[in-house]
Amino acid sequence: MTLPHTLLEGGLLVDGSGQPGWQGDLLMAGDRIVCLGERLRAHPPQGIDLAAAEVVDCRGKVVAPGFIDAHTHDDAAVLRMPEYLPKLSQGITTVVTGNCGISLAPYRVAQAKPPLTLLGADSFRYADMAAYRDAVVAARPSLNVAPLIGHTTLRFAAMEDLDRPASEEEQARMAALLDGCMAEGAFGLSSGLFYEEAYAAPADEVTALARVVARHGGVYATHLRSEMATILEAMVEAGDCAFEAGVPLVISHHKCAGPANWGRTEETLPLVDRLGERQPIAMDVYPYVAGSTVLREDLVDGVIDVLITWSEPHPEAGGRMLADIAAGWGVDQQSAARRLKPGGACYFQMREDDVERVMAHPRTMIGSDGLPHDRHPHPRLWGAFPRVLARYWRGRGLFTLEQAIHKMTGLTARNFRIPDRGLLRAGHHADVVVFDAERIRDLATYAQPEQLSEGVEAVYVNGQCTYREGGATLTARAGRLLSRKDFSA
């Protein structure tokens, strides 16, 4: 059977490696890239008839690998809304799920507790990776899913009381669950030691699980125990855990949080480089000065702005500033936060120069860290990747176009060991984005976060056109649950 061919003609091919782009054509057939070259329609590869090929004029446009979101909480979102417009419309073709210690598998419970609720309280139905894989296959999402296994999820699955270290028996149970998930193709382990439900875990508990990951050739990503005053100590702890276990380390959403820590990326980034002299290490970052997570009064200091994204007892508070809510109630902000819990919030706890330093660092990938289950989400859910190009490449000139795309594609595929993606190469899977470099920009704001970006003209996932600009999701939903087992260094 002859596979249908699609020829993307005359675009600026930026291949995801960081090398300079060049004007040319890209030919796809089935789910693979066939070749890249010049004037392929006039001079097709030997044995290929392009008479019936779909030809797409890409002159004046950039043709790049589909973006890979290095840090997401999309585990349940790809099942509940498989067309997944917030990510697809940004040019994202693969999401790395299971971050911050929180993954859907391997845990089954009717009603989850925080912080697992970041994925939806009623989402935890998958006792192992095979069950989650079956769910992804049945949902047929529009983009690919590369799952990590969460340390906090493992703790919930193996322990009754999470405010203490795991016992020897509980550690063995967690290791067995993780081993099974890795054997099924999971990409590695994540931790969220910042969260209360994992904070009691000592370093050796994490190291023991990371050793399981090492046996399978996976990676370890961590939301550090602290991103505030003790951030350097937390970074050393993470580095030591990964080094002792023999796994590559990814520091999640690297930041220096809180006014007392602004400017400290001048300390943290040299530490990353020193750790990198002895071990593989990378970071991800989102292009905003506000983070977003569950509502915690210890993060409310009366100095930074806090935007409520959802509240169970007071749903009307979503989208309002905590200071305004507190003033209306006649209480201080911490008291108001306690009254609003359980809930979520955006915390404006970073400074722009720190964000820029992290983003420009050569070890840094781009991740959205969006929370799709928030009623009033952070704008990063809809706009993170176009924002990098519009604000930090085109506007601020922090890096070249090729470097920006490398941070969104090839670097991420390499760090997470995602096979045959992240580069425009013959034989690689045909995950491709076509965008207008002069027009691409994010429109999502804190006030109106659910806004399509501009300038992403077409998105191909496994060779099928899944999105065209303006919100047109096509009938094709060609995403897959990816497997680390296919990776070869």
Image (spheres, rainbow, N blue to C red):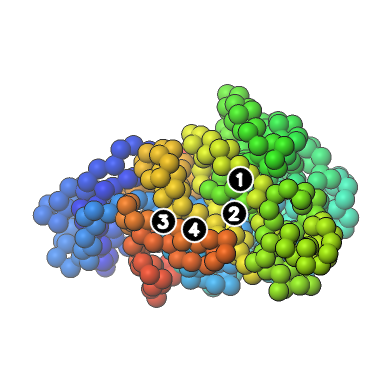
Report the front residue among 275 and 194. Answer: 194
Assess whether mark 3 and mark 2 are in contact (beta carbons under 8 angstroms): no
Q: Residue at x 34, y 48 (%)?
A: 424
| Mark 2 secondary-structure assignment | loop
Give the mark nearer the N terminus: 2 vs 3.
Answer: 2
Question: Whole-percent x and y of residue 395?
Answer: 40, 45
Q: CA distance from mark 2 to mark 3?
A: 18 Å
Judging by the rendered image, the residue that carries numbered circle 1 is: 253
Q: Nearer the viewer, mark 4 or mark 2?
A: 4
The circle drawn on residue 369 is 2
Instruction: Tell me: 107 left or right of 436.
Output: right
Q: Amino acid at mark 2?
A: Asp
Q: CA distance from mark 4 to mark 2?
A: 11 Å
Give the mark nearer the N terminus: 3 vs 4.
Answer: 4
Judging by the rendered image, the residue that carries numbered circle 4 is: 383
Assess whether mark 2 and mark 1 are in contact (beta carbons under 8 angstroms): yes
Judging by the rendered image, the residue that carries numbered circle 3 is: 441
Pick out the residue farthest to the left: 42
Instruction: Tell me: 220 left or right of 21.
Output: right
Question: Whole-percent x and y of residue 63?
Answer: 31, 52
**Mark 2 residue crowding within 10 angstroms, few (<14) / some (14–19) / many (20+):** many
